[in-house]
Structure formats: C-alpha cells, structure tokens
Amino acid sequence: MKKTNIIYWIFTSLFSVLMIFSSIGGFGNDPEATKFMSDLGYPAYFVFFISLAKILGVIAILIPGYPRIKEWAYAGLIFDLAGATYSQIAAGMPTDGLIFMAISFTLAFGSYLYYHKRLKEKAQVTT
C-alpha cells in the first residue's frame, strides 16, 4: 500500500502542478494566453473559464473523499487535454507541442489508475 501511495502522489502532484501552471495565464489576463487561445479559434472569454475549471478540477482530485466528484474531475481534466490536443492539431500548430500533451496524458492516466489502485487496496485492508 505504501508503494502505491507514493506512486499515486508522484503522478497526482505532477499532474496537478501541470494543470495549475497551464491555467495561471487565464487568471492574470496574460496576453500570450489569450493569443494562444485565439490562435486555436477560441474567444477571449473562454480563457478565464477554462482556467477556473482546471483549478476546480485540481482541487477536487486533491481533497480527500468525494469519490464521485473526483471521477467527474478526472473526466473533465481529460476532456480538457483531449480538446487541447485536438485543437492544436486542427489549428495546424507545430507537432512538438504534442510531446507536452503526451506527458500530460501520461500523468493524468497514471494519477487516475493509481487512485483506483489505492481505493482497491484500501478496501482489501478494511475487509
């Protein structure tokens, strides 16, 4: 159980930091963030909304308990990553950004898989 917890927290911490850093520009009205989203074809008001959604998703996966909310948060963050990946491809942006997206997906899925592994191990200990 200890090894699972360590691996879970490594994946989850890195994934959370990545999602928080990717949302910071949306809160400060960063012109680069707005331009990037505009290049993807999104309106300027979408930047703040998606940044707020990411922060709320990270909070949901970090707080203990609330397994149903965690499931929704993981789903929302994965949808965000999938939408960002598709948008970059559709907008014809350079493919080197896809390496970053692959790392993001790896961290997200690692966190999610070890979250479930922790739940399973915790259930086995209590029975």
Image (cartoon, grey):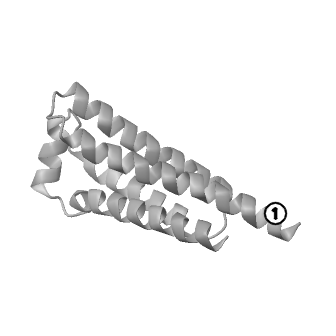
Q: Give the SS element for disc 1.
A: helix
Q: Position of residue 51 (x, y in %)?
A: 33, 55
Foreground pick, 80 / 99? 99
The image shows residue 74 at horizontal and vertical percentages of 52, 50
Q: Within the image, what quadrant is residue 23 found in? A: bottom left
Closer to the camera in the image, 67 or 43 = 67
- Residue 52 in the image: x percent, y percent? 37, 57
| Residue on which disc 1 sits | 124
Residue 7 is left or right of residue 104, and the answer is right
Q: Is residue 24 left or right of residue 19?
A: left
At label 1, the amino acid type is Gln
Q: Position of residue 39 (x, y in %)?
A: 14, 36
Q: Is residue 46 visible?
A: no
In this rendering, position of residue 36 left or right of residue 26: left
Q: Residue at x 16, y 27 (%)?
A: 92
Residue at the farthest front position: 3
Residue appearing at x 60%, y 50% in the figure: 71
Q: Quadrant of the N terminus?
A: bottom right
4 or 85, which is in the foreground?
4
Q: Is residue 75 above or below residue 42?
A: below
Vertical placement of residue 39 versus 62, above or below? above
